[in-house]
Amino acid sequence: MKNITSKLVKYFLVNHPNSGELAVSRLTKLVYLSDWKNALEHQEQITDTNWIYDQYGPYVTDILDMAKDSKEFKVSEKRNTFGSKKQVIELISKINEIDLDDNTKKIADFVINATKNKTYNQFINLVYSTYPVISNDKFSKLDLVGNAASYQALLSLENHEELAS
Amino acid sequence: MAIPKEPWYLKIAQWGLIPGIMGAAGFAVLSISDLQSFFWSLLPLDWQSALLETPGKKGIIVITFLGSLFLTSWSAIGLSWLAHHRKSGLESLNTELEGAIAQLNSKDIDTHSLFSKFIFGYYRQLGLGTGERISIYKATMSQLLCIGRYSDNEQFRNQSTKLYSRNVGVLKTAWETGLADHSVPICPIENLEAWLDYQVQVFDFERSDVEGIRMKSRSFYGIRIKDRDSQAAIAVILFESLSADGLKKTKIAKLISAEQQRNMCHLIEALEEHLPDLSTANEEGF
């Protein structure tokens, strides 16, 4: 399953319009959104990441570790205008085609399109507004599949109430 | 953002105006013979004799020409260099400002901590203790999201969940009617089963849900917060106590005046962009 995480990260790096500027934390959250979207639509995550609600939202070091261990990625440090450091994952050599199934590509494209024009604040607010983050406590494990079921139940209740009123 | 010290060559370039005037004056003297005679007449006679000897009349013209050329070149090159440097400096400053504004706008505000500190003020003013707690809940879809909480008791400050139904309990009463003032006649320490039954029968809770409640309160006082037009409910502030008479409800009612409610409303609305909202994610397909 590490392979699928690697492929998904590659897909973002190849297809995201701002891939050169994607900090590790933002890239990790894109993978989280993909896992969450897939849990909502197909009752399973794309990757086997055990998501944790960290101090700053869903975060795991798996993606950074995977990039550091792989010969296909390089992790570099960039500085923004104010000199703050950010870690960026880049592909070592150019890739044109990534071997991903159509569903994963569709989910990844959905995530890219939903977030590509968002400012940092809008992006973070979207991640923090997802059901697993909003309904779980900090430093807890996020059961995306279980949360997807609870969220669907909540949404259907919502629709039911709307119809009734 | 520190302003960098200007290098020496820029300081010289800034003095380009005076050489420009002097250079232009030099060329004017060279081209107008009346001016030459005028300036020549201003010189003392011994200077005139000395200058005619060395460098001589032609020499004076060459020196004046070269001097004027140097001064006008200094002026032209210096001023255009300065203008270019200032322009790129301004562009870089503009980029930095844009970045600063973007960074300022994108500050990740810890709203839970902010609201918890906000209600801490009420907690102190009311003289509440370890048996009490204040929470503030904001509406998100059909749920209430706890956006701030304070208690001196660490056990009650932490939350096992952040989303609460607005269709059960005192939150329902506060949400629907504007005020929830309720005291539970049963002490959970003396009779837990009866206390649990009361929650199920009176508040419509699922038994499994109340069994997991950490703070088994006996006294509640909840106030609904409306939006700035007083049209729609947006939040609820809830005071709870483990003791049946642990809350000074008259004091709470006086403290959470209409003005204080408006303040809370303004604070929530001002931080709207930073507060998580299920409907935000739902509208985006997540």
Image (cartoon, grey):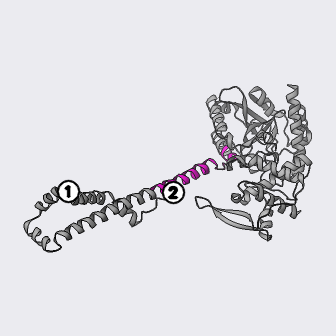
Q: Where B285 sits versus A8, above or below?
A: above
* Left or right of residue B93, residue B114 in this image: right
> Which residue is at 77% across, 52% downward?
A138
Element at badge 2? loop
Quadrant in which residue A65 is drawn? bottom right
Q: Nearer the viewer, residue B207 or A27?
A: A27
Marks 1 and 2, the one that precedes in the sequence = 2
Q: Nearer the viewer, residue B201 or B277?
A: B277
Residue position for label 1: B32
Residue placed at 64% from the left, 30% from the top? B257
Q: Position of residue A7 (x, y in %)?
A: 84, 61
Q: Nearer the viewer, mark 1 or mark 2?
A: 1
Neighbor class of circle 1 (other Cα within 10 Å; few <14, some 14-19, many 20+) is few
| Residue A136 seen anywhere in this rendered image of the structure | no
The amino acid beneath tag 1 is Ile
Chain letter belonging to callout 2: B
Residue matched to label 2: B1
User: Quick check: is A79 in the magenta stretch?
Assistant: no
Classify mark 2: residues with Cα within 10 Å, few (<14), some (14-19) or many (20+). few
Vertical order, B94 against B233 (above or below): below
Residue A40 appears at what percent x and percent y? Answer: 88, 46
| Range of residues picked out in magenta | B86-115
Q: On what subunit does the disc labeled 1 rest?
A: B
